[in-house]
Image (cartoon, grey):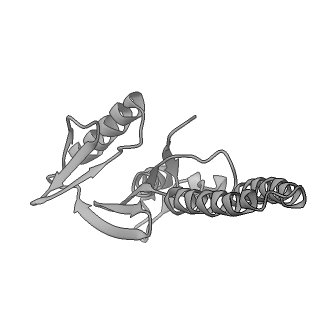
Amino acid sequence: MNPATLPVMRASAVPAASRMPERSADGAAQDASAAAVTMAAATRHWSLQARCSLTPRQFGLCFAALALVSALVATLFWLLGAPYVAFFSGLEVLLLGLAFGWHACHAADGEQLSLRGSRLHVEHRAGLRHWRSALDLNGLRVAETDDGRIELCSHGHALRVGGRLAAARRRQLAAELRRLALN
């Protein structure tokens, strides 16, 4: 299982025509590729969340299949004269539904990091809670904590991210954030 994706470029590719030097009003040539590199660096995005192996539809079909099997077993035992099996089968489906609901609620837990200009925007999702923060890259300090997360500190604000990342990916992300903070 791959626990997270690291960086995704959000900037569109620069068309070939814009790679040619442009002329300003005074006739001096400007390098459009330097502007494109600046634009690409300013729109980095990292998704730090667990990946699910089933789509929501597949997840729902799995639950429906388990509930159908349980209902068929309960009906069979009801017809054979054991009505209490139906009660326990219904309880089983209820508890299974609660477990599936809890999993579905937390399937999108994690963080989204976006670099826009000179600010690092962090969007954190945990169950039904969702909050956003923004940190200035000037003075950003990146540290790895004892609990295996990355701590981002800037101007008195501290955030911990990357709890769902594998150790190698966490080190890669921390190194990249340090490099961006130094630029």
| Quadrant of res 27 | bottom left
159 vs 37, left or right, is left
- Foreground residue among 108 and 81: 81
Q: Residue lying furthest top in this view? A: 168
- Asked whether residue 183 appears in the rendered view, the answer is no
Residue 34 drawn at (x, y percent): 43, 50
Identify which residue is drawn at 20% across, 34% down: 146
Identify which residue is drawn at 52% across, 51% down: 9
Figure quadrant of the N terminus: top right
Q: Is residue 76 above or below residue 162?
A: below
172 vs 71, left or right, is left
Identify which residue is drawn at 86% across, 60% down: 75
Residue 40 drawn at (x, y percent): 46, 53
- Foreground residue among 153 and 86: 86
Identify which residue is drawn at 71% across, 58% down: 89
- Asked whether residue 77 appears in the rendered view, the answer is yes
Q: Residue lying furthest front in this view? A: 81
- Foreground residue among 68 and 141: 68
Q: Is residue 162 above or below residue 101?
A: above
150 vs 77, left or right, is left
